[in-house]
Amino acid sequence: MTDLTARWPLGLNRKTWPDRVLTLVMVLFALVFIDAWASQTLQAWPDVWRAPFAFITDFGLSDWILIPSVLVFALAAIALRLPLGRYRRAIYELGLVAAFIFIGVGLPGLVSNLLKRVIGRARPEHFLDTGTFQFQHIVNAWDFQSFPSGHSTTAMATALVIGFMVPRLFRPILVIAVMTGLSRVVIGMHYPTDVVSGFALGLIGAYAVRNVFARRRWLFANRADGSVRFRGVPNLTRLLRRWSYRAKV
């Protein structure tokens, strides 16, 4: 998964996808047997241990990244209708970056929210009353929207979307994403199976959006060797450097 230039993660392709899906199903099946134990054990940690996870869990909220990105995209779209001269290309690139972030994070999150409503799995707070396999399909409240974890989906998609464009940031943000997923179990909002499924959804969703952008040569390009490379934002970079230089002077 750390090869961010691969077309799909984990060696996934047309030939291997059935094996990868089977592996995911087997992992989730294995985790089912520790869902209750892990949930109850982590929730029983002392408050001083749980406090950092209660803080980091908000990284999985989508508002902090979707709202700014859609606002930047809207402003860029409006600005492109104005006579901007030499700034036009830079603003176009800024709009593409904002669109990629919004779609790359928002689309997997949307799919996650739809799935959790259709599946309707009870959250851990109902464990003592109903166990780990109580469902209210489609028509349900938030406490029956446990599978998959939307926070985990958003956190993983965010790590990848940023990593595709700035690879050096991928690993530190990935660590935060994993901690976010763990936090969902610690604070009693999800089971491990919910978190792992959310990670998988965020992973595939981010790659899928990146590949669509690459086919249209928006920010990314498909190479002859099968890799997908970030084309960069040269005009935006030059503009920011120019402004930074002027600010220092």
Image (cartoon, helix red, strand yellow):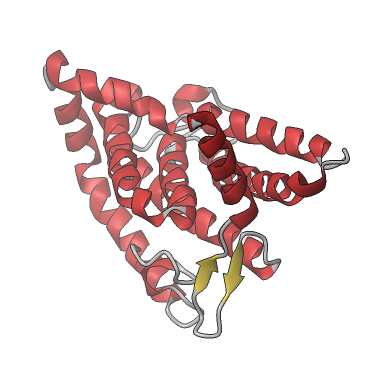
Q: Is residue 190 left or right of residue 51?
A: right
- Tell me where residue 116 appears, x and y as whole percent: 51, 38
Q: Is residue 129 visible?
A: no
Q: Residue at x 52, y 54 (%)?
A: 206
Residue at horizontal 29 percent and vertical 43 percent from the top: 178
**For this view, does 243 lie left or right of residue 30?**
right
In the image, residue 110 above or below residue 206: above
- The quadrant in which the N terminus is found is bottom left
Residue 243 versus residue 141 in the image, above or below: below
Q: Residue at x 58, y 37 (%)?
A: 243
Q: Position of residue 121 (x, y in %)?
A: 44, 35
> In the orientation shown, which residue stands out farthest toward the front?
249
Q: Nearer the viewer, residue 185 or 103?
A: 103
Instruction: Determine the image quadrant of residue 83.
Output: top right
Task: Return the residue nearer the eye: 20 or 219.
Answer: 219
List x then y, in percent, for residue 150: 47, 37
Q: Report whether residue 39 is seen.
A: yes
User: Is 67 displayed left or right of 163 in the figure?
Assistant: right
Where does the image place residue 140, in percent across and percent down from the top left?
56, 26
| Residue occupying image coordinates x 42% and y 64% | 4
Seen from the viewer's position, the closer of residues 34 and 222 is 222
Q: Is residue 233 above or below residue 159?
A: below
